[in-house]
Amino acid sequence: MRLNRFNTNSINVGTTGGGGRFPGGGGGKVGCGTIVIAIIAALVFGVDPMQTIGMIGGSETGQQIEQQAGGQTEEEICTSNKYALETCNALSSLNETWEPVFRSAGVRFQQPMLKFATSDRFRSGCGQAASGMGPFYCPADEGIYIDTRFYDTMERQLGAGGDFARYYVVAHEYGHHIQKLTGVAAQIRSLQQQRPGASNQLQVLMELQADCYAGVWAGKNRNLIEPGDMEEGLRAAASIGDDTLQRNAGQRVNPEGFTHGTSAQRMQALKLGLDSADDTQCDRIVELR
Ligand SMILES: [Zn+2]
């Protein structure tokens, strides 16, 4: 996808971590071994951050994890490596694409904050987090958290390479931001509390809607799409379906345990958004009334 270079006026970017060197793209290594990879992949797309971070938190002392200062400008952060640049370009485009949609719908719009993790453990608005969790969205501070080394994992271990696969990750997390702003996220949470038995199913719907929103963004920027992008996006969507992840982890496929949707469902949701370029199509995935 031929995205324009980010515009610092239309993004909100920072870093978070222990103050270490900013991890470079391309050469970073994330933990290895299939179990670790399966866990990373399972967590990629917005398992409830409170749950996942809650699991990781607690064992850390606040001392080790300090807000990274650095005093870097957005320009410096976004150009520190190839993946950071791609992520900032995507964020800029996402803001510019979604802001008018909100405006015309009369819904308050607020940019999310993009936070690059600069260490293996870092602080988020939802508590202490670890890079191994993969990218996530934190509703509490409306932050999208990404360690760019994850993109290497995606490409090398999940077989989901290509720039569009990475844009899809950002656009999916952005989809959770949209759900926060529209109130869908809060409605789902309260439904989950009322009906714990349907909790996973509701989570799946939320993930599929975020996939659909990712597709809408790309569909609204169709003129920037290059040959191969669709395939990259669909391959990424397929590689992180619950059924595929369970199979790869050597488990029997168990629909009850799904929280993100099957590969086919994720591809379908992305395609629905892409083909229609219409966000109201994604409302149909989550019909709350
Ligand atoms: Zn998600």
Image (spheres, rainbow, N blue to C red):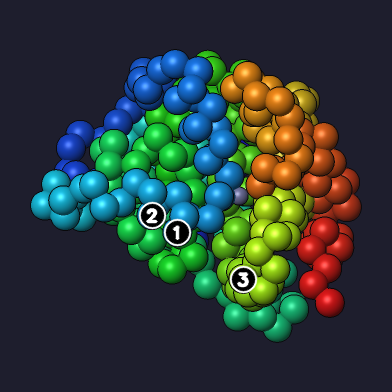
Give the mark nearest the N terminus, 2 or 3.
Answer: 2
Q: CA distance from mark 1 to mark 3?
A: 14 Å
Residue 169, percent from left and from top: 59, 41
Establish whether ligand 1 lies closer than 8 Å to the Cβ of label 1: no
* Amino acid type, label 1: Met
Q: CA distance from mark 1 to mark 2?
A: 6 Å
In front of the other: label 2 or label 3?
A: 3
Residue at far bottom of view:
106
Residue at 41% x, 17% y: name it: 32
* Mark 2 neighbour density, 10 Å: few (under 14) some (14–19) many (20 or more): some
In the rendered structure, find residue 193 and report the number of the disc placed on it: 3
* Mark 3 neighbour density, 10 Å: few (under 14) some (14–19) many (20 or more): few
Q: What quarter of the picture does the N terminus occupy?
A: top right
* Amino acid type, label 2: Gly
Q: Secondary structure at mark 2?
A: helix
Residue position for label 1: 50
In front of the other: label 1 or label 3?
A: 3
In the rendered structure, find residue 54 and report the number of the disc placed on it: 2
The reply to whether discs 1 and 2 touch (Cβ–Cβ < 8 Å) is yes
Residue at 66% x, 80% y: name it: 107
Compared across the picture, whether 122 is left or right of 6 comes to: left
Compared across the picture, whether 113 is left or right of 57 comes to: right
Residue at 36% x, 62% y: name it: 125
Q: Secondary structure at mark 3?
A: helix
Q: Which is nearer the eye, 169 or 121? A: 121
Q: Secondary structure at mark 1?
A: helix
